[in-house]
Amino acid sequence: MRSFFLVAVFSFIGVLSGCSSMGVEAWERNVLAKDEMQLTTDAIEAATDDHIYFSKEASSGGRGFGGGGCGCN
Amino acid sequence: MSKKDMRSISATLAAATCTLLGTGAPQPVQAQEEPGWDFNTALLYYGEQDDRIQDLSVSVLTRKVFVDDRILSIGLTVYALTGASPNGALVQSVPQTFTKPSGKKTFTTAPGELPLDNTFRDSRVALSLDWQQPLGRLYAFNVGASASAEFDYLHVGVNAKLSRDFNNRNTTLSGGVAVAQDELDPVGGVPVGLTRMRNVDERTGRTRIESKDIFDVIFGVTQVVSKNFLVQLNYSYSDSSGYLSDPYKIVSVVDGTTGDAVPLPPADGPSHLNFYEHRPDSRVKHSLYAQGKYYMSGKVLDASYRYMTDDWEIDSHTIDIRLRWPVGERSYFEPHLRFYSQTAAEFYHLSLIDGDPLPGYASADYRLGDFDAITAGLKFGWKIGGSDEMHVRLEAYRQSGNLSRSQLIGNQADRDNYPDLNAIIFQFGYMFGK
Amino acid sequence: MNDGRPERVIRVEHRDGCWCGQFFAMGGPCEALCEVDDPEEVRQLTSLVAAEAWRIEDKFSRYLPGNIVSRINEAGGDVVEVDVETAQLIDFTVTLNNLSEGRFDITSGVLRRVWRFDGGSNVPKQSAVNEILRLVGWGQVDWASPIIRMQPGMEIDFGGVGKEYAVDRAATLLREATAGACLVNFGGDLVAIRKPALRNAWNVGVEAINSIRQSDKLLKLEVGALATSGDARRFLFRDGIRYNHILDPLSGWPVPDAPRSITVAADTCTQAGMLSTLAMLEGARAEAFLDAQDVRYWCNRGDDATN
Amino acid sequence: MRRLVLFAAFLSLFAPGGAAVADPPLDLPAYAGKVVVVDFWASWCVPCRRSFPWLNAMQAKYADEGLIIVGVNLDEERDAAEEFLREFPADFRVYFDDSKELAKEFGVVAMPSSYLLGRDGEVRERHYGFKVRQQAEYEARIVEALNSLE
């Protein structure tokens, strides 16, 4: 299982290194400008989920900066 | 009046007004609405089965966009928490008595039941502030602060982030730092790790307040791949130091052959031998987070993967998939699946063996064990009025622990020492004023 | 000439970082805000504005005996010759009458004899409406500029256009008198003359209730005009039906489904005011009408529950 | 009523938003001797909304001195552009660059992108994005171009 994930991550990095040849023209961003195409569509939902999983699991963050708190339950 | 006739009216009127006033307007009108505040509000219920934790919270996130895309966001969440949480002790075939964290009373767990500490009745208030603004054409900058308070816990933090666009804005690199300080002031004081659970009114070996410092760094790349495909990759580093244990958690001490908890002579205190847990005083985490958003004729696939590893030897994988599926012009469904898997911390011990030398660190907290979790949910959102939106979300969360036979001693194999955690999440959200 | 109306005085005060001259005209408080440092100069500029407002009020108010409106209304079927300014105003209202297919009508004021919008339940009988409706209709007026002749009993009323006209006239005077940025505001109908230098724009509050939240919108007006038609407080309520005060001269009854108020932004106050009035007369189609006009507007439909 | 209809028919030639008529090709060299602002925009672009009132004001203010503003639309769908124009009417020429040829020629890298062409037809200034707080500076560049002889 883990090796699968690592392959996924490295192939992702490989894709990114080809950055300069990727992308769209300035006028081709109508889809990317939509609310539902933003990386975080609902900030409260994201924060809520982060807090729930922070309180129940040993991992947190990754997306951005988390909110904190003890999560002691 | 037909639409075409209607349109001609303003022109006719302008001409007539010009005749009346003897002059036209020297300049055309320029009026813009001062952007107001927009609000994102939510009511959330999180409830665990078997009378464990129930959490009700209300969140309000308000945002104001100032001239030229400078944005102020203020968030406030109030939580009300009740219920019980496993204290780390093992299930036994006899009743077990424990001293409450306050040190003033005891409670007893029935035979065959997982010992739960039911003193949780807490409220939490969390506040966040964020200011975001472009710097020139290609840079953007944001600073933020967060604070939260519980009756026994205080968190304050600040963060800053800078990003720059490259490659005709198709690539964005960003970097940020955050620092936070947390302070614990638990009921009955902070116990010393790996010492025996105290009797009622025993006051030795406790400090009142402990704290921890957290330092985070994040680097991210966002890349536009095509007109409808966007990816993000983040690396984050997090360093916590200070008091990282949970002052309310304990570890059972058992007989090396039977696996049963070691009984203590009768006293106004615990019936069996338990130690307060003790975790290292520092933790360094690394995570890689990748997210992709893909638009396919109205539907949006949002998939992310996170790999986390730390020096407590916890590795975790998280996969999160959402598919936003529009229904008509004004509503959508969004199924959500999340898979999580983690390995145990190196100092995770279901129990400690009586007579063996004490390990440096030990915790039986189920959250540091080896487990898998799955979340499945569905969200339905609909637009009201111009751009206001409401949504409801219902999700189920299940955590199942992985204990191998080799970790269990004697009778432990006959008891469910790592029961599944089942919870539901319900959220109602309302966004308005955009 | 103080006949029970407010005294004609000018007050100058410093407000929101600039000098503001205030006076009372046309049934409400009026003001001129000027980005001019010298309060004495602001007093002089305000006098200019106030003098024009009072002149127009005296000339076109239907309450003042002896003025041109009274002479026309009391002619008893005789011919009256009007001056150039009055003729231009009448011509203007004739254009509006045409544009609105008869629903904007300066002879409709007599309907107020049977309709009293005091928030009560005094809805008139159809027979009373029919009776008064005989005296309404620009089509019955003989108008060949500058000669006017009306049926006895008919009345004209410039109330629907006078204030906006006065704001524009005052703004024209002010624009010539000073190089500074000014805002002329006659009870919410206003013109911004030049963009203020100290701030980016004039801040103007607009009563807008398009959604379930009741809040005032704050507008940034750089230059140009805003005018509002309608008044959320003037209505009748009977048998579960709310009657607004916008009367349709064709039927003699309030326009169904008219918004409570509409604010329009346009180049001149007269244009803004007329567009908002015409939109009101469109009733349920007010927004569609304004959408077709390519203007910015803020429509207040409020909550149609009882009070 | 007939009078109104006739009048209306006459005025509709000048009515803003009358984009349904076939779009004549944009012939920039034909504007030689004028100062031209070529402003590339799209309906989904937020700063474009802010720029329209300002462009309208500039066109009205400097038309007599020889300023021509051309708003070049780069939307993929004409309907979206027309809806935008209903909300933010343009009092200057709007050209629909359906083939995006003009955008490629100018090398548009941001939305909006604005190019100031002097009386000689050469590009004098490029502005990417639109900042309300830089309006005065944009205006000063236009005035400079208008005042320069060649």
Image: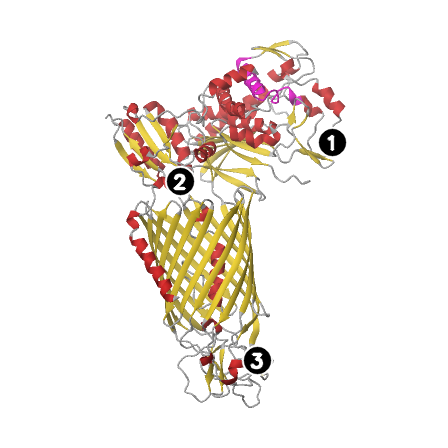
CA neighbours of label 2 inside 10 A, class few (<14), some (14 to 19), many (20+): some
**Identity of the amino acid at label 2?**
Pro
**Identity of the amino acid at label 1?**
Asn
Name the residue located 40 percent from the left edge and 53 percent from the top edge.
B292
Q: Is residue C45 above or below residue B120?
A: above
Residue tagged 3: B104
Q: Which residues are magenta?
A: C83-109
Mark 2–mark 3 distance (CA, rounded to whole Å): 63 Å
Q: Please provide percent x and percent y for residue C282.
A: 60, 28
Q: Does dot 1 land on a helix, a strand or a loop?
A: loop
Residue D50: image quadrant is: top left
Residue C127: image quadrant is: top right
Q: Does dot 3 land on a helix, a strand or a loop?
A: loop
Chain on which label 2 sits:
D
Which residue lies most toward the bottom here? B265
Task: From the viewer's side, name the closer residue of C81 and B118.
Answer: B118
Q: Give the side of residue B212 with respect to residue C83, left or right.
A: left
Residue tagged 2: D47
Residue tagged 1: C122
**Identity of the amino acid at label 3?**
Lys
Q: Please provide percent x and percent y for residue C209.
A: 57, 40
